[in-house]
Image (cartoon, rainbow, N blue to C red):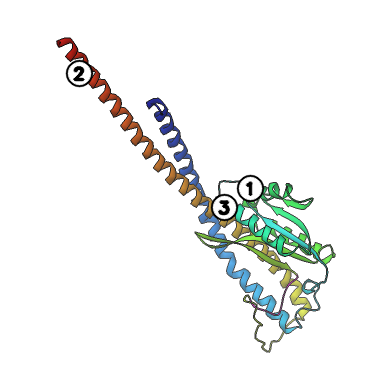
C-alpha cells in the first residue's frame, strides 16, 4: 500500500505532467489556427484550378497531346508518404501507416518506390522496405512554403517525364474539420481530364481557347501541380496539429482526473493516520488513569 510520502510524490509528478500537456495543448492550438487558415485559404484555389485543367483537357481531346496526361502500362509507382516529424499527436501517424498497408495489399502487382516527408514516416519505412528513394527534410514540413513544395512537385514531374515511374501517388491526411482528418491516397500523375471530383464525366460546352491549348497547358499545368502539392502538405500539417491538440487535451484531462483521485487517496490515508494517532493518545491517557 502506498504511503503518504509516496502519494505526495505521485501528486507532484502528475501535476507537473499536467502542466506540460496543458502547455503543449496551447501551443498546438495556436499553430493549428495558423495552419488551418492557410489550408482553408489554399483549398478553393487548388480545387478551382484542378477543375479548370480537367475541363480544358476534355475540350482538347483529354490532354492526349500533353505527356503529363499519358496513361502508361508500366507498373512502377512512386508514392509520397507524408507524416509528422514529432510524436505525441495521437493516432495521426498510425492512421497514415494503416492506409499505406492497405494500399500495399491492394497493389501487390505494382513496383512501389517510396518517398517520404516527416521523420516518423522515415523511421517506419526504414525498418520495412529495402529502399527509400528520397527524403524531403530540408526544410522540415512545418517550415515549408509554396516555393519548397513547388520543388517537390517539380521533382515528381521530372521522374514521370523521364519515364522513371509510370504514376505518382501522394498519401496525405485530408483535413475535414477540427476533429476529422482522413488519410487519403491522391493520384498526382498522370493527370486526368475527363471526370470531375466524383468521377462523373464533365459536361461538354463550346469553348474558345486563346492562345493555343499547348501554350495554355504549358503555363497552367505546372501551376496546378505546385498548388495541389502545397495544399496536400499544408492539410497534412493542419491535421497533425489538430490531432496533437486533441491528444494533449485528453492527456491533460486524464492527469486532472488522476490528480483528483490521488488527492482523495492522500486525504483518506492522512485522516486514517490522524485517527489512529488520536486513538493511541486516548488509549494512553486511559491507561495512565487506571
Q: What's the CA distance linking mark 1 and mark 2?
A: 64 Å
Helix, strand, or loop for circle 3? loop
Q: Nearer the viewer, residue 214 or 181?
A: 181
| Left or right of residue 206, residue 285 in this image | left
Of the 4 image quadrants, the one containing the C terminus is: top left
Q: Which mark is residue 282?
A: 2
Q: What's the CA distance linking mark 3 and mark 1?
A: 14 Å
Whichever of callouts 1 and 2 sits on the residue coming sooner in the sequence is: 1
Q: Which mark is residue 85?
A: 1
Assess disc 1: are there few (<14), some (14-19) or many (≥20) residues with their C-alpha within 10 Å of its C-alpha. some
Whichever of callouts 3 and 2 sits on the residue coming sooner in the sequence is: 3
Q: Is residue 138 visible?
A: no
Of the 4 image quadrants, the one containing the N terminus is: top left
Of circles 3 and 1, the one toward us is 3
Q: Position of residue 7 (x, y in %)?
A: 40, 30
Q: What is the span of residues highlighted in magenta in the rendered image?
A: 190-196
Where does label 3 land, which residue? 91
Q: Is residue 27 visible?
A: yes
Amino acid at each position: 500500500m502506498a504511503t503518504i510520502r509516496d502519494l505526495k510524490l505521485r501528486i507532484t509528478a502528475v501535476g507537473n505532467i499536467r502542466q506540460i500537456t496543458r502547455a503543449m495543448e496551447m501551443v498546438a492550438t495556436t499553430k493549428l489556427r495558423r495552419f488551418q487558415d492557410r489550408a482553408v485559404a489554399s483549398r478553393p484555389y487548388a480545387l478551382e484550378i484542378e477543375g479548370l485543367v480537367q475541363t480544358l483537357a476534355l475540350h482538347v481531346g483529354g490532354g492526349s497531346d500533353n505527356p503529363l496526361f499519358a496513361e502508361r502500362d508500366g507498373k512502377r509507382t512512386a508514392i509520397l508518404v507524408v507524416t509528422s516529424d514529432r510524436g505525441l499527436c495521437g493516432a495521426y501517424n498510425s492512421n497514415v501507416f494503416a492506409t499505406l498497408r492497405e494500399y500495399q495489399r491492394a497493389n501487390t502487382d505494382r513496383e512501389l518506390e517510396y518517398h517520404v516527408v516527416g521523420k516518423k514516416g522515415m523511421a517506419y519505412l526504414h525498418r520495412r522496405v529495402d529502399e527509400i528513394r528520397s527524403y524531403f527534410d530540408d526544410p522540415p514540413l512545418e517550415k515549408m512554403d509554396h516555393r519548397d513544395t513547388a520543388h517537390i512537385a517539380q521533382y515528381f514531374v521530372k521522374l514521370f517525364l523521364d519515364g522513371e515511374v509510370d504514376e505518382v501517388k501522394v498519401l496525405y491526411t485530408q483535413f475535414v474539420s477540427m476533429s476529422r482528418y482522413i488519410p487519403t491516397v491522391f493520384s498526382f500523375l498522370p493527370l486526368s481530364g475527363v471526370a470531375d471530383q466524383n468521377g462523373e464525366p464533365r459536361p461538354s460546352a463550346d469553348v474558345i481557347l486563346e492562345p493555343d491549348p499547348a501554350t495554355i497547358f504549358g503555363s497552367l499545368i505546372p501551376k496546378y501541380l505546385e498548388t495541389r502539392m502545397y495544399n496536400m502538405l499544408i492539410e497534412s500539417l493542419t491535421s497533425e496539429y489538430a490531432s496533437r491538440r486533441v491528444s494533449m487535451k485528453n492527456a491533460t484531462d486524464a492527469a486532472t482526473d488522476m490528480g483528483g483521485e490521488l488527492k482523495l487517496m492522500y486525504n483518506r490515508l492522512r485522516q486514517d493516520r490522524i485517527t489512529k494517532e488520536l486513538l493511541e493518545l486516548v488509549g494512553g491517557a486511559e491507561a495512565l488513569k487506571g
